[in-house]
Amino acid sequence: MHDGFRTLLDTSMCHDAWLKHMVRKLPGSVSLVSTFPGLLVSDIMNITFPGWLIPILKIVMWPLADTQRTMGIHHASILAAPIINSNRVSCWVSPLLEAHETNAITNVEKLGKWTYEWLEELIESKKARRPNKHA
């Protein structure tokens, strides 16, 4: 399996594990849905990445990314999918145009907790390295 595709699958599972952990912290009336691959080509790239990188990202993302219109159609389909009402955490698989349960490995509570804690530490380390603009 190509390393890039493997990384995409690994991050998808970590994302689902994080969602499973987060849903335990939320009221029972709340459901969470992830979208795979969930890439959207939008104007936010213009403020997130250097200008010279934007054309390259658009070319690289094109085979996997959705337009805003397509993403909107997916979201309407997600809201209408029967599995969404039966599971608090689901995954919308864009290429298949259907909702699925998340990977069974994401049901391991320790994995979700570890993913959550690792991401929190990552955020804190990034904050610590960022120069304080107000100092």
Image (cartoon, rainbow, N blue to C red):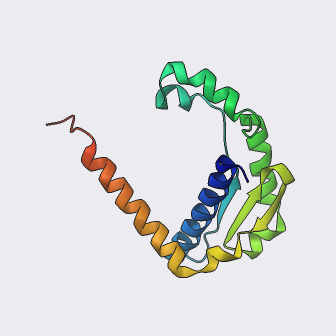
Q: Position of residue 68 (x, y in %)?
A: 71, 35
Taking the image as drawn, is residue 26 in sight?
A: no
Front-lying residue, 13 or 40: 13
In-image side of 131 versus 19 (left or right): left
User: Is 65 rendered above or below residue 108?
Assistant: above
In-image side of 69 versus 22 (left or right): right
Q: Position of residue 98 (x, y in %)?
A: 84, 58
Quadrant of the rendering where the C terminus is positioned: top left
* Number of marks in picture: 0
In-image side of 135 versus 38 (left or right): left
Quadrant of the rendering where the N terminus is positioned: bottom right
Residue appearing at x 83%, y 68% in the figure: 82
Front-lying residue, 19 or 105: 105
Farthest residue to the top: give it: 52
Residue appearing at x 49%, y 29% in the figure: 49
Q: Quadrant of residue 133?
A: top left
Q: Quadrant of residue 131?
A: top left
Q: Position of residue 3 (x, y in %)?
A: 65, 50
User: Is 51 rendered above or below residue 117?
Assistant: above
Q: Position of residue 120 (x, y in %)?
A: 38, 61
User: Is 46 rendered above or below residue 106?
Assistant: above
Residue appearing at x 50%, y 80% in the figure: 110
Taking the image as drawn, is residue 33 in sight?
A: yes
In-image side of 95 versus 72 (left or right): right
